[in-house]
């Protein structure tokens, strides 16, 4: 994805994407434990593949993250996924 860096860093778009606008499968590219991670853990490469579910043009790449606070007495998951309720993260 390094080929995207010049454009994405010049004009990043942060917006809400509804789940009905997603036209491919999802692919997890990284999972880290913020409690035990090392700073170098965020320097990574990952292979992934996506399966198109519709015959249409792709207009963007949607990325999101989930934070799982599973060590709390009442588990909480903060998600920015288009499949979850919108948050203030936009």
Image: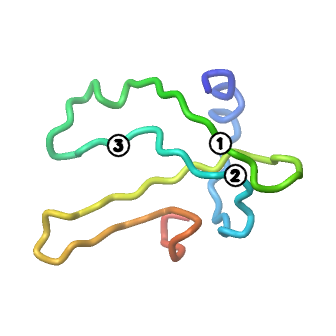
Q: Based on the displayed image, in which of its 4 quarters is residue 38 positioned?
A: top left
Q: Residues within 10 Å of mark 3 (few under 14, many from 20)?
A: few
Query: How far apart, in angstroms, are the residues tagged by discs 1 and 2?
Result: 6 Å
- Residue at which label 1 appears: 50
37 horizontally vs 78: left or right? left
Mark nearer the viewer, 3 or 2 = 2
> In the image, residue 36 lies at what x, y percent?
15, 40
- Residue at which label 2 appears: 24
Which residue in the rendered view is the most extreme toward the right? 56
- Residue at which label 3 appears: 31
4 horizontally vs 45: left or right? right
Query: Mark 1 touching mark 2, by CB under 8 A?
Result: yes
Q: Based on the displayed image, in which of its 4 quarters is residue 14 positioned?
A: bottom right
> In the image, residue 76 lies at what x, y percent?
27, 72
Considering depth in this image, is 47 or 40 the residue closer to the camera?
A: 47
Q: Is disc 2 placed on a helix, strand or loop?
A: loop
> In the image, residue 81 lies at what x, y percent?
52, 62
Q: Is disc 1 placed on a helix, strand or loop?
A: loop
């Amino acid at each position: 994805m390094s080929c995207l860096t010049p454009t994405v860093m010049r004009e990043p778009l942060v917006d809400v994407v509804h789940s009905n606008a997603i036209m491919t499968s999802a692919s997890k590219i990284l999972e880290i434990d913020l409690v035990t991670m090392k700073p170098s853990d965020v320097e990574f490469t990952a292979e992934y593949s996506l399966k198109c579910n519709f015959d249409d043009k792709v207009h963007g790449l949607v990325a999101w993250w989930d934070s799982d606070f599973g060590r709390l007495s009442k588990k909480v998951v903060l998600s920015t996924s288009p499949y979850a309720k919108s948050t203030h993260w936009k």
